[in-house]
Amino acid sequence: MPEPRYAARDAVTIHYRRPPDRVQVFEQGVVDDAGDCVVTYLPSARMERPMEVDGRVVLEPGASIVWFTYRGDVWHDVGRFHRADGTWTGIYANALTPVRMEGARWETTDLFLDVWMDAEGGVAILDRDEFDAALAAGWIDASTAARALAEAERLADDARRGVWPPAYVGAWTLERVRRVMEDGRGLDS
């Protein structure tokens, strides 16, 4: 069955499994469907405390995230992170299983590793300790773990070489996303 196509301002519900037994559900609005990638918008992150990388707040409660979710055999998604005041802080990628898009319901499983590229271009692979613990506990199998690690290392290497993230990630600024969600006007307006 072909995967569905989405229009701006459609709503999707993302069921995000975090092994061993936690599921988070996110409701996001579709901003754009470019075929291989669907851009969605989370206007206000629900979280208990700010997320920090190297002592710097990169995401906090109430902050907006622009997400890029891929069709097909892609083992990551990408987020443009902000602070609550709208300041862009950087690009974040989750290593995860390919997303199953079934109408308005999407499903994926987190594979613990994340790649962070700050606004100045610094790159790091995050949460290696959580990844190692999940592998040791049997929450992910060796084959899946190898795939996740290879994906995170490839993204980090590509970021260091200046060939990741793709240009369209930079084009979907928070301001552009908000225009589309408010009145349907995108980059060309």
Image: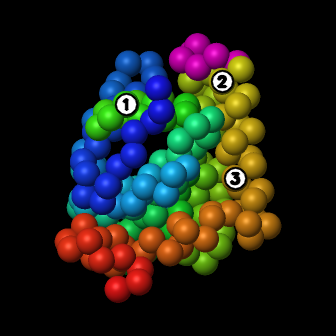
Name the residue located 41 percent from the left edge and 34 percent from the top edge: 101
Q: CA distance from mark 3 to mark 2?
A: 17 Å
Q: CA distance from mark 2 to mark 1?
A: 22 Å
Marks 2 and 1 in Cβ contact (< 8 Å) = no
Helix, strand or loop for disc 2: helix
Answer whether residue 108 is visible to the viewer in this image.
Answer: no
In the foreground, 156 or 130: 156
Label 3 belongs to which residue?
A: 155
Q: Is residue 30 magenta?
A: no
User: Looking at the picture, how far across and down is residue 57, in whole percent?
Assistant: 42, 66
User: Looking at the picture, how far across and down is residue 183, in whole percent?
Assistant: 21, 74
Label 1 belongs to which residue?
A: 102
Label 2 belongs to which residue?
A: 144
Is the residue 116 above or below the residue 69 in the image? below
Disc ID at residue 59: none
Q: Quadrant of residue 143?
A: top right
Residue type indicated by callout 2: Thr
